[in-house]
């Protein structure tokens, strides 16, 4: 469930809000494309340019990781997440992990 009032910020301070820190929170996902798309990406790699299927996969992974971050923070009783960041990495040759992480906070 998406809460449009839940704030996720890349900054440390939310203007006009005082809060207490609840702790670290994260959301993770690992994505992979199917074999046919991997072959197509291999051909694209020979000629250069954007590999749109992988760009789409990373965009989806980013969105999923942020949603999981939000859900995990809400389970902690948080009203917001500050200092949100992303990290990503490859697993093998065709899988990509994305982590969204930050600090869960509760408004005073």
Image: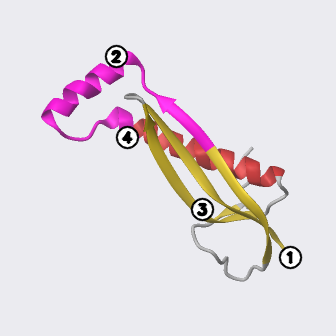
The stretch of residues the image draws in magenta is: 28-55
From mark 4 to mark 1, how far is it between C-alphas?
40 Å
Q: Are marks 2 and 3 in contact (CB under 8 Å)?
A: no
Residue 74: image x %, image y %? 79, 53
- Residue indicated by mark 2: 36
- Res 84 label: 3
- Residue indicated by mark 4: 55
From mark 3 to mark 1, how far is it between C-alphas?
20 Å
Q: Main secondary structure of the magenta part?
A: helix
- Res 108 label: 1
Q: Circle 3: is it few (<14), some (14-19), or many (20+) Cα within 10 Å?
A: some
* Magenta-colored stretch includes residue 33: yes
Q: Nearer the viewer, residue 80 or 4?
A: 80
Q: Earlier in the sequence, mark 2 or mark 4?
A: 2
Q: Is 98 positioned to the left or the right of 78 in the image?
A: left
- Mark 2 vs mark 3, foreground winner is 3
Q: Secondary structure at mark 1?
A: loop
Q: Earlier in the sequence, mark 2 or mark 3?
A: 2
Q: Residue at position x 56%, y 47% from top?
A: 99
From mark 2 to mark 4, how far is it between C-alphas?
16 Å
Residue that extends furthest to the top in the rendered view of this protein: 36
Q: Secondary structure at mark 4?
A: helix
Residue 95: image x %, image y %? 45, 31
- Mark 3 vs mark 4, foreground winner is 3
């Amino acid at each position: 469930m998406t809460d449009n009032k839940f704030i996720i910020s890349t900054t440390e301070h939310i203007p006009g809000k005082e809060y207490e820190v609840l702790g670290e929170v994260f959301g993770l996902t690992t994505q992979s494309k199917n074999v046919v798309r991997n072959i197509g990406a291999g051909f694209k790699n020979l000629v250069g340019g954007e590999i749109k299927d992988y760009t789409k996969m990373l965009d989806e992974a980013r969105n999923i990781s942020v949603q999981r971050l939000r859900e995990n923070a809400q389970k902690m009783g948080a009203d917001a997440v500050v200092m949100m960041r992303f990290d990503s990495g490859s697993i093998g040759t065709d899988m990509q992990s994305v982590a969204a992480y930050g600090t869960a906070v509760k408004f005073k």
